[in-house]
Amino acid sequence: MKTNNRFIVAIVLVVVATLVAVVSCKKETQANLPGISPQPSKAFAPPQVDDMNAYLEDFKQRMLTATRGDGETLSLEEAAWHLSSVANYDFCNANVKFTDLRYDTLRYHIDVANGEVSLTDLNAVYASMANDIDAFYQSLDLQEKHFRYIGASISEDGQVMATLTTSYIVLDHTWYFEDDWEASLYCYEYFDQNMQYVWNTSAIDTLEHYLNLLEGREYVMPGEPLPVRVYFVYASTQQFNYTDHIDPYGSDFLGNSRIFAVEADTYAVPTLDLNKMCYCLDSYLGLGFEYISNGGPSLGNQRPVRWEIQGMQYEYPEQHKWDVFCHILYVTYGQVVASNDHPINY
């Protein structure tokens, strides 16, 4: 049995050697034929053109007017370069200011034959890709959004990937304080950065205290000499719920609410750190004064005189595992009255 195996191996080696000799001989013969020389494969080199805009616009028209069967094909690298370049020509604006980036991927498929794709198939992929890029852009809830770069790749099995880099601006926005710097000055003074404030006890007590403290200011009545005594008469009390006030810039709370609200296990004890406490302070003060400014001249002589917070826990219907823990903000408004003809000793 061992002898037979050796014999079979010997035969195979002879056959392989013969095939190698034949192939080598054939290559030498072709190389020696007049007018025929080996054609090494060339890597795709992006075109060097004076007017890239005109070149890409012309290529788009070639794709649009290509018909199946006309025989025009591109290598995978060449097709990917044109796919990316035309997309950047159509959609990208890199000459903008931005503060952050996001990265996303779109996927498609194209038929590949002998390492090449037809121009008509490439046009079909680009048409789908262009529609998706536009829809994706419209869906982004970002400030000053722009596509910065769109890359493309095509694998040998026809998988097409378009990678989108989108720039945008994260706006620093405050509702009551002048800016983030002013807010941070107050917040680092008022709140302990190493403390977790329990949502319905220490968080409420602390927020109520500083909401009322920040609005304990003197009021100057137009046309009245200084100093002037001011007092309030009750005007109204307004309730602010988490479902009614959404932060368009985003928040850490349920549904991007401007008022504390989180989903958690029924027996959870949510807490607020310094950043969340600072956000609530700024947002709650802002809500209280927005009510006056949005009410027009009729409320121009009113001011918040008391800020109160109530903690509520709502159970989802037919879902007993998760609850909503939230604050309800109450602001009492008083009409500002000046009095100099009724002196008091208080």
Image (cartoon, rainbow, N blue to C red):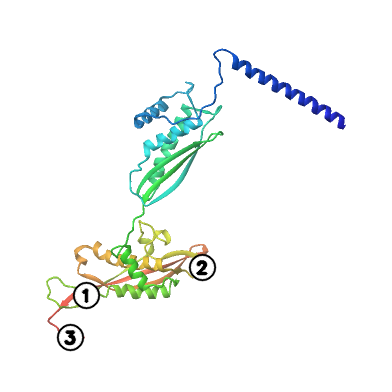
In which quadrant will I find the C terminus?
bottom left
Q: Mark 1 points at which residue?
A: 218
Q: Classify 131 as above or below 269.
A: above
Question: Which tag, 3 or 1, sits closer to the chain's start?
Answer: 1
Q: Distance between the residues labelled 3 and 1?
A: 17 Å
Mark number for residue 344?
3
Which residue is identified by label 2?
A: 266
Name the residue type under label 3: Ile
Between discs 2 and 1, the one toward the N terminus: 1
Tell me if mark 3 has few (under 14), some (14-19) or many (20+) residues whose alpha carbon lies within 10 angstroms of its own: few
The disc, 3 or 2, on the residue closer to the chain's N-terminal end is 2
Q: How far apart are marks 2 and 1 (CA)?
A: 44 Å
Along the line of sight, which residue is nearer the eye, 52 or 205? 52
Give the residue at x 12% y 81%.
Answer: 341
| Vertical placement of residue 320 versus 119, above or below | below
Mark nearest the camera among 3 and 2 is 3
Picture coordinates of residue 36 (x, y %)? 56, 15
Residues tagged 2 and 1 counted as in contact (Cβ below 8 A): no
Q: Measured from the top left, where is residue 208 in percent x and y?
A: 35, 74
User: 266 or 66, which lies in front?
Assistant: 66
